[in-house]
Image (spheres, rainbow, N blue to C red):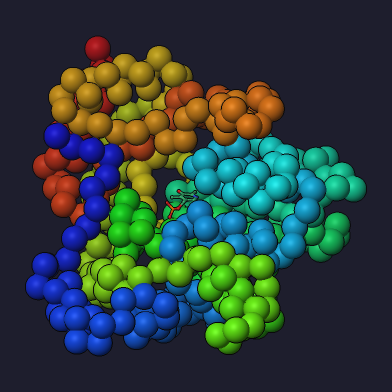
């Protein structure tokens, strides 16, 4: 069976090496040495000013909304994972969906201003598949209307734009280190900000608001992660480059094999590096996509309709709203298998099956 993704695991001995240290110190969580080491390594690797390692990418979003004290309406994208929208609702705010750009599949900045009301407090945008949003346009709109900006960078690990980290943009950027993501610590998340005051507040929020053993600085939550998770992050750290190179090679193989397929890929940001987190294909229509999906599934290959359906039409806690571009793209997009253990022979097989559907 070939799934859309398969988590990377380092050699077991490399993980166990970290475990023996944990047994020696008997320090299991709460800003232990492995958690701190991971934060330092990731900060240097990503070239960001400040970074916090947290439980997961969802709590990272919730903490971001809490720390910025957002109220009322938050403008967001319907073409993302459910956590982007659910975090807004969980924090007592209302999501206001703005349709996506048909080329980048990210929120369309030219449609944002029409959605701003006197109750709008922020924009929460996703760098879909790791492809950067139009950060300059979003920044201009935010400045003009005095709005905060949060980027859900769950897919964007390692992406650089204009010569710096994509996580440098917005008031706060977040990332997910979940097992299915490009780089992972089993469960895990990152929060990045350039603002030292905001960083301090987020650090309090991560640890119940504690300011010393008997004092509290903030309303907090438990957003900490454990030494065991940090150990996996550290064991995986040494493989970031190898994983990148292999995914790049597989992506280029797909591109070559599928050059005659009547399908397109999202248009990548012109000034950004690629991280090869996903291999999305936009078919000409949903029938062609569904036939392709059935063909692959019949051969034990399981791509995913990622993202389908649109978040604006499916959540029981949000009023349903049709969105022209999002609904159209969601009806005909498929993410093909892409992971470290995938071979180029398997890519060739997948490509041949897709071409066979088209040529039938
Ligand atoms: C995976 C994902 C999240 C949530 O991250 P978790 O670490 O699983 O909580 C949020 N947003 C997007 C776009 C994601 O893909």
Q: Quadrant of residue 316?
A: top right
Residue 53 coordinates in the image, percent (x, y): 45, 72
Residue drawn at (45%, 19%), measured in percent from left and top? 285
Q: Is residue 98 left or right of residue 313?
A: right
Residue in the foreground of this view, choosing between 68 and 224: 224
Q: In the drawing, does residue 37 fall left or right of residue 326?
A: left
Q: Taking 87 as reference, is 233 above or below it?
A: below
The residue positioned farthest toward the right in the image shown: 118
Pinpoint residue 19: horizontal percent, then vertical percent. 18, 76
Q: Residue at x 64, y 83 (%)?
A: 215
Q: Residue placed at 14% from the left, 34% from the top? A: 1
In-front residue for pair 217/290: 217
Looking at the image, the residue that sits furthest to the front is 214
Look at the image and tell me whether residue 64 can be seen: yes
Tell me which residue sits at (36%, 59%) in the image: 187
Q: x, y (%) of residue 309?
A: 50, 28
Please state the total of marks drawn on the protein image.
0
Relative to residue 48, is residue 260 depicted above or below?
above
Q: Is residue 65 above or below residue 82?
A: below
Q: Is residue 109 visible?
A: no
From what the image shows, is residue 212 above or below residue 139? below
Which quarter of the rendered picture does the C terminus lie within?
top left
Q: Position of residue 83 (x, y in %)?
A: 52, 46
Q: Nearer the viewer, residue 182 or 229?
A: 229
State left or right for residue 36 relative to residue 218: left
Q: Is residue 11 left or right of residue 201?
A: left
Q: Residue furthest top?
A: 360
């Amino acid at each position: 069976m070939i799934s859309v993704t398969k988590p990377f695991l380092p050699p077991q001995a490399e993980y166990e090496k970290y475990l023996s240290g944990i047994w020696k110190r008997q320090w299991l969580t709460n800003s232990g040495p492995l958690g701190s080491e991971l934060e330092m390594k990731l900060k240097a690797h990503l070239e960001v000013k400040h970074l916090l390692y947290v439980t997961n990418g969802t709590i990272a979003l919730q903490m971001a909304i809490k720390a910025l004290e957002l109220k009322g309406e938050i403008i967001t994208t319907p073409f993302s994972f459910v956590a982007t929208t659910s975090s807004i609702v969980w924090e007592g705010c209302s999501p206001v969906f703005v349709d996506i750009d048909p080329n980048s599949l990210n929120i369309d900045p030219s449609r944002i201003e029409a959605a701003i009301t006197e109750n709008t407090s922020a924009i929460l945008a996703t760098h879909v598949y790791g492809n950067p949003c139009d950060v300059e346009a979003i920044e201009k709109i935010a400045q003009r209307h005095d709005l905060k900006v949060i980027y859900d960078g769950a897919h964007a690990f390692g992406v650089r734009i204009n010569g710096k980290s994509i996580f440098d943009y917005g008031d706060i950027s977040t990332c997910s280190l979940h097992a299915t993501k490009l780089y992972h610590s089993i469960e895990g998340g990152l929060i990045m900000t350039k603002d030292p005051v905001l960083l301090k507040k987020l650090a309090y929020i991560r640890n119940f608001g504690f300011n010393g053993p008997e004092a509290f600085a903030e309303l907090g939550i438990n957003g900490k992660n454990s030494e065991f998770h940090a150990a996996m992050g550290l064991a995986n750290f040494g493989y970031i480059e190898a994983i990148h190179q292999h995914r790049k090679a597989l992506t280029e193989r797909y591109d070559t094999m599928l050059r005659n397929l009547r399908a397109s890929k999202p248009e990548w940001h012109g000034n950004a590096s690629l991280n090869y987190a996903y291999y999305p294909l936009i078919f000409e229509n949903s029938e062609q996509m569904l036939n392709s999906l059935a063909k692959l599934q019949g051969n034990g290959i399981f791509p995913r309709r990622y993202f389908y359906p649109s978040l604006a039409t499916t959540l029981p806690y949000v009023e349903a709203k049709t969105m022209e571009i999002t609904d159209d793209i969601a009806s005909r997009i498929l993410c093909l298998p892409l992971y470290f253990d995938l071979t180029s022979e398997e890519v060739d097989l997948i490509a041949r099956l897709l071409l066979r559907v088209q040529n039938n």
